[in-house]
Amino acid sequence: MLLAGGFAQALTPMNLLFALIGVFLGTAVGILPGIGPALTVALLLPVTFKLDPGGSLIMFAGIYYGGMYGGSTTAILLNTPGEAASVVTALEGNKMARQGRGGPALATAAIGSFVAGLVATIGIAFLAPVIVKVAVKFGPWDYFALMMIAFVTVSATFGNSPLKGLTSLALGLWLGLMGIDGLTGQARLTFGVPELLDGIEVTTLAVGLFAIGEALMVVSMHKTNAEKPMAIKGSIWMSLEDWKRSWKPWLRGAAIGFPIGGLPAGGAEVPTFLSYNLERKLCRDKNAFGNGAIEGVAGPEAANNASAAGTMVPLLTLGLPTSATAAVMLAGFQQYNIQPGPLLFVQHAQLVWTLIASLFIANAMLLVLNLPMIGLWVRLLKIPTPWLYAGILVFAAMGTIAANPSVVELIILVLFGIAGFLMRRYDYPVAPAVVGLILGPMADLQLRRALQISLGDPMVFLNHWSSATMLAIAFIALVAPFVFKGLSRFQAEED
Amino acid sequence: MFAKLIGCGVAALCLSMSNAVAQDAKLGELSIIAPAGAGGGWDSAARAIQQVMTETGIARSIQVLNVPGAGGTVGLAQFATGAGSDANQLLVGGITMVGAIISNNAPVKLDAVKPLARLTGDPLAVVVPASSDIKTIDDLLGKIKSDVAGTVWAGGSAGGADHMLAALLTEAAGEDPSKVNYVAFSGGGEALAAMLGGQVVAGISGYGEWQGQIESGDLRALAISYPEPIEGIDAQPLKAQGVDVELVNWRGIFAAPQVSDEDMAKLTAAFDEMVKSDKWQELLKARGWADYYLPADEFASFLTEETQRIEGILTSVGLAGK
Amino acid sequence: MAEVAPGGHQRWALDRPKLVTGIILLAFAAVTAYDAYSMSFRSAYGLNPNTASYLVAGILAILGIGHFISAARPSEGAAVVEADWKAVGMMGLALASLIACVYFGAGFIAGSTLLFAFTARAFGRKAFIVDVIIGFVIAVLIFLLFNKLLTLTLPMGPLERLI
């Protein structure tokens, strides 16, 4: 069998070492806030140039998985998501870390990533041709309908005041308007600042609202707030209970993440929102979510990793880079004169299977490297508070100016930090703003794209069964809570 | 903790990266501004120059500085104001930057810097899905003529080279280019999915991006926008098929605004040597880029004409800045 | 933070932060609507790019009014804890000095060193010199990692050029 051949090719001691180095470098760079997987891979790509194709592919896969995983570590421990896809992880993960359960949170993220990566890599190996056929049929109308489903799930991050949650969401939508409109090239809300023409970077908002906002909040309370939230309590490993609560979310997360990642414009963020919301709905203990529910870490982390693997489907079968990370990977392949595309599986079958085997190995290596590291990471929180936050600020600022060395970007980052502080102070949730910034522009673009193709006919959303079904789901999800509430009130009055 | 980790990273990186330093280089320590994020087209062009010039010993060392933003105009503005007469600072740019300056009405234009060399040029391909009734470029022009609104195009960003070519073809078919129904996607990837899914009529992208699908027969390439036929590409130029349209996605390099004539001559000679080196030619082949070299003087006059032409195209689709 | 409005109308208890938020939201809505109104480009097919702007402006306006209504209602929310504004100001100084260093060309290392030292001070650390040294070492290490090995250039200053 071809996969076995791929493993034979990939499993040499030297390659295992390359995988280990790759995972290590990927995690080390990916962990810096503001430096997402795409930049990590782009930065470390030259390291792989010196190796032979087999060795470099495997190191590459290691860097990729390491970079994906790195973002969640800071999200959990420091409430500082390194990239957009880890925003949801920070919600429950950081609550866990504050209760001294950072160890289990990191473990469920690592094992969840591994399980999801495993499931998704099997998916790539066997389902890629099927998935890609469905994926290219996905039109703008379908994406818009998918965004609507994702929007409905945002309410899960609102906390207890809909007014405040919606305000935060609206702030994100407003920021999403900024920049050149992708369809017409028209600038919106840029106030003549050229740096705003490209719009607001999601990582800048996430790092500003979370990392800097959090640091300002902590410093403003450091005298009154004697609570030292981050001591390690109990085992740093997952208990039997944690395993029981995690394994289903891992599998569900993988099932959501992989197909959406396979869509050409699916992205890694949407599946994490959907997974978080699903786990919240399925969780029996209604008070668990918002207070550090392990399901809220396990599901989204699995979804994130599975969607990352999912982006390999269009990349390998169509040569279609559907994320920034995938675009960088494509550049990596081209170094070896490999042109991913419909002919890749035919022309370079051996290499493809070596790559898939490499993904398996890198995935396993991630677990090997990171499980023992958890103890070390958790101890990060023992750094005295002044140095810890000073360090976070230095790394947050560095991540932002490394990606875009401009004073304007730094000023924007600090403004978001102040906004994050004020929002925390007056009890506005910050996550909906990030969600709004991610989903708003996507929904706007796909809506207008659909209407442009249909020459302005809104029936385009109902004429396609797929988008009509998804819109119906979104609508039901939106009104169902009100209906149920009404029904139960009605019944209560009957009694 | 972080510091320790980074220290380990440094050590590991040192092991795997060791750049050979050239002994007698013609140029000193250059820094090239890539006015786009890491991984994009201009960034890879800048890093390609970095690779070839240091390996051939033309330059001692080269640093690539990413200044992304607004189609390259942010990087251009920074370069034009900051580089002064420094011969060691260079800027990468291309047709997209020319377009972005016009459509964003950018305050700093390309005449603020000195054209040094035009380096690469990628042909654009006009394609339709394999299942389409449209078999030739004439069929496509006929379709535009009969139903300009229904001829939905897919391609890269609004105002980019793909959009310009769609407008030129609409005009060539005798229709009003402002009526072109062009759906912009972020890059050739998403546009490709729309093509394969049959959501649009025709598509435009760099030939290289869709090469795989064209060779496998999923897409039919009707024409390329390059002036001459290209070896290894079956699709013929628009000009050879009787459509008087040409558009090349070129990239070039620019020198600082007040660079002295003496330094300019040195830089021109260095780039001339680089372009003719085997390493550069190999790299072009590996990346699928066409050699579109023009030395400084000719590049300057080309740039003047090209700017005027692009302004005309963008005005016709209503995208020129006010 | 329920407060009593000045003057004779003592029965009105206004929630001032909510009132201010409402005003900010309305201002955002106005700016957005004006920006959308002044867009000249119309797309030939489908919706115009300013449709979303009007929609968001509408949402902001509704939320702004929502805040006014909510501000006028008796507030049941817990009072906001008094903040240590001196510490917040020190952190603001830390961030401002980083921006200033990058803007005036003092470079990344100087900026990060000050950012680190001032932030640590904001948290009550007294040993300023020690913190400056720690910040400096971290900044130099980061700079070396990025500039020399990842070939990603951080803002340059006199210190950076020496390395």
Image (tube, coloured by chain):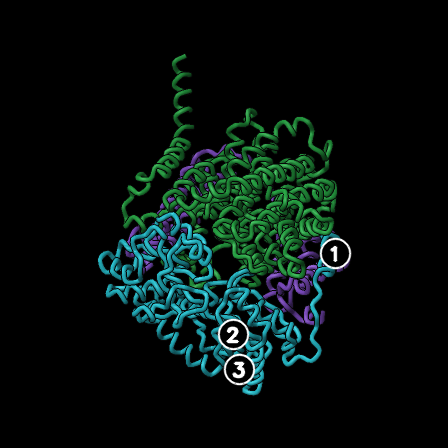
Chain colours: A green, B cyan, C purple
Chain under numbered label 3 = B
The Cα–Cα distance between marks 3 and 1, rounded to whole angstroms, is 41 Å
Write the residue at 46% across / 61% down.
Answer: B208
Residue B253 image label: 2
Label 3, residues with CA under 10 Å away: few <14, some 14-19, many ≥20: some
Q: Do pointers 2 and 1 mark residues of a single chain?
A: yes
Q: Is residue B123 visible?
A: yes
Label 2 secondary element: strand
Chain under numbered label 2 = B
Q: Residue B204's spot in the image, x, y percent?
A: 38, 60
Write the residue at 73% across / 31% down.
Answer: A234
Farthest bottom residue? B262
Of labels 2 and 3, the one closer to you: 2
Image position of A461 (left or right of A442): left
Q: Residue A349's spot in the image, x, y percent?
A: 56, 49
Label 1 secondary element: helix
Residue pointed to by mark 1: B7
Residue A462 image label: none
Write the residue at 32% across / 56% down.
Answer: C37
Q: Do pointers 3 and 1 mark residues of a single chain?
A: yes
Residue B258 image label: 3
Image position of A270 (left or right of A148): right
Identity of the amino acid at label 1? Answer: Gly
Tell me which label, 2 or 3, sits earlier in the chain: 2
Q: Residue B294's spot in the image, x, y percent?
A: 48, 78
The Cα–Cα distance between marks 2 and 3, rounded to whole angstroms, is 15 Å
Identity of the amino acid at label 2? Answer: Ile
Of labels 3 and 1, the one closer to you: 1
- B47 versus A189 height, above or below: below
Quadrant, the C terminus of chain A: top left
